[in-house]
Amino acid sequence: MISKLGYVDEAEKIIKNLSERKLLNTNQIRKILSKVSVIYEKAKRKTGNLTEQEKMDLQVLRAHLIYDSGRDEGVRRFVSEAKLVENIKEIGDSREKLLIFCGYMEALVAYHKYYLANKSN
């Protein structure tokens, strides 16, 4: 599982590696973040363990990641290198782990945008 204090550095390392190979476009990564954001918005307002609905939402997200990975090589590499499926499995019923995962996804998108913009210049 990504750590509370290390997820931003981990995101940068992964995106640096992927951006060198130009495997992923902005729309693909933002589509994933959009799905994560819906889960985050529901989860941040509550306390305690995740509800059954929240855990089910994570399972649906996991299935979408697998499906999207099968359709596109860039998404597959991103999901694999960022260990998104493994990190979702590690969340269990921990709200804190879910919120860290959501922050990790935001950091991945931010670094993708940063390194993509730098490549354009």
Image (spheres, helix red, strand yellow):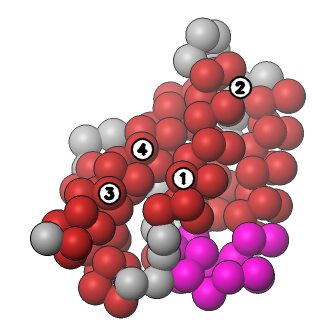
Tag 1: residue type?
A: Arg
Read off the magenta span: 67-79
Compared to 50, does 120 lie above or below?
A: below
| Left or right: residue 31 compared with residue 118 | right
In contact (CB < 8 Å): disc 4 and disc 1:
no
Instruction: Give the mark toward the camera: 2 or 3.
Output: 3
- Tell whether label 1 touches label 3 (CB within 8 Å): no
Disc 3 residue type (three-letter): Lys
Place of residue 115 in the rendered image (x, y in percent of width and height, measured from the top left): 24, 66
Residue drawn at 61 percent across, 22 percent down = 41
Q: Residue at x 34, y 71 (%)?
A: 14
Q: Which residue is mark 4?
A: 106
Task: Identify the residue position indicated by label 2 in the image.
Answer: 50
Marker disc for residue 88: none
Mark before the other along the chain sequence, 2 or 3 = 2
Q: Residue at x 48, y 71 (%)?
A: 25
Q: Which mark is residue 113?
A: 3
Q: Secondary structure at mark 1?
A: helix
Regarding mark 3 in the picture, which secondary structure is present there?
A: helix
